[in-house]
Amino acid sequence: MNLQRQIGFWLGTLLVFVLFLFIFRDVLLPFLVGMAVAYGLDPIADWLERRGLSRLAASLVILVGFVVLLALLVVLIVPLMVNQLAGLIDKIPTYAQQLQALVQAFLETRLGQMLKVDPGQLSNSMGTLMSEAAGWLSALLKSIWSGGSALVDLGALFVVTPVVAFYMLIDWDKMVARIDSWVPRDYVETVRSIARDIDHAIAGFVRGQGLVCALLGCIYAFGLMLVGLNFGLLIGIGAGILSFIPYVGTTVGFIVGVGVALVQFWPEWQWIGATVLVFAVGQFIEGNILQPRLVGRSVGLHPVWLMFALFAFGALFGFVGLLVAVPASAAIAVLMRFAIARYLTSPIYRGRLGGDDQPPAHP
């Protein structure tokens, strides 16, 4: 098979895969989640196999434990999160008005004198800006509230996903071996090397960053609840989840948390400072302990590339696209590095087709 036919084959395969995702995006959610669960739990199944359990028994033990843990989280945490989200949506207009009053007082007494502008005009402009921002945030949270309940069919998710995960976990090694047997023998080592790099990138980021998100969510939620911040559980866990995109979770959580703290604790600065300290401690732990040990520096997913992938796949395929975005972006990044490495060793880059390795002389 010559180069043009190879390129045509792989481009055609990619096109079919994209069309498949687009056509069946409304029914893929429980299957993709089940596949992700099986992929994440496969190392544990391998470990249990090495300890003497059969693959079936190991898969059953893991899946039962996973379902029990998930059920406990749903029963204990989700109701609190739902109540706090509903309360936060209702409180946003009131919080916005109170925060606007605080900002206007600061503008009229301090900033207006420093900038030598009309305090009334400055406060009116800031008030309009904050009202628009509060309206946008309220609409966003309401859309998440209504869209989330309509988006995820809990019956399908909690029934189909464990079944898919169980069967895929049983046959995971067999599926990998079968796919490996389909690779053309002339390219099998190259494909295996690329597959190992993709697996390393996905495992290092998804498993590592997922654990970082969980630990950060616990740190933020515990710290904010200890301070006594309203909606501290929701803000903390939300910041932890959004930390899947580096720096985004801490930034969003900090802005929302400090905004709520200003309204709730003003003028008691010590509690506002304690809220800031919670996020500072969380950021220090993430940067100096969690990220180096759990994720490492060899994953190769730049935050900007990850954000672009999430936006692009989310816009194309909705919630299913968000699930596909991280593994797809990791695979694309590995393939791009492989292509660049091949290009740098090619005659096209060296500048002498079939010649020696000496660079051409410059006049």
Image (cartoon, rainbow, N blue to C red):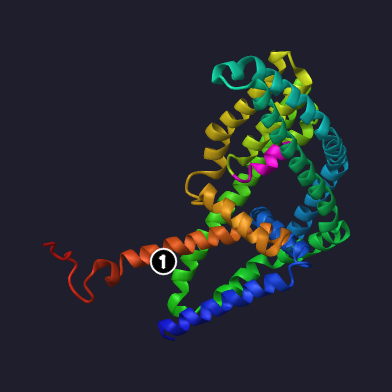
Residue 183 vs residue 93, the one in the foreground:
93
Residue 327 vs residue 107, the one in the foreground:
107
Question: Which residue is farthest left?
Answer: 363
| Vertical arrangement, residue 226 with respect to residue 200, above or below | above
Q: Secondary structure at mark 1?
A: helix
Q: How would you rate the neighbour count of disc 1 (Cα within 10 Å): few for under 14, some for 14-19, many for 20 or more?
A: few
Decide if residue 3 is on the left or right side of residue 277: left
What is the x, y in percent for residue 98? 78, 24
Total tally of numbered discs in the picture: 1
| Vertical arrangement, residue 1 with respect to residue 10, above or below | below
Q: Residue at x 23, y 75 (%)?
A: 353
Residue 354 vs residue 130, the one in the foreground:
130
What is the x, y in percent for residue 345? 30, 66
Our reading of the magenta stretch's main secondary structure is helix
Whether residue 54 can be seen here: no
Q: Residue at x 61, y 41 (%)?
A: 248
Looking at the rendering, the stretch of residues picked out in magenta corresponds to 237-245
Q: Residue at x 55, y 73 (%)?
A: 180
In the image, residue 243 lies in the stretch drawn in magenta: yes
Decide if residue 159 is on the left or right side of residue 43: right
Q: Residue at x 71, y 38 (%)?
A: 133
In the image, residue 21 lies in the stretch drawn in magenta: no
User: Which amino acid lies under the numbered mark 1 shown in the image of this protein?
Assistant: Ala
Q: Which quadrant would residue 314 be assigned to in this image? A: bottom right
Decide if residue 331 is on the left or right side of residue 77: left
Q: Which quadrant would residue 341 be assigned to in this image? A: bottom left
* Residue located beneath label 1 in the image: 339
What is the x, y in percent for residue 137? 75, 41
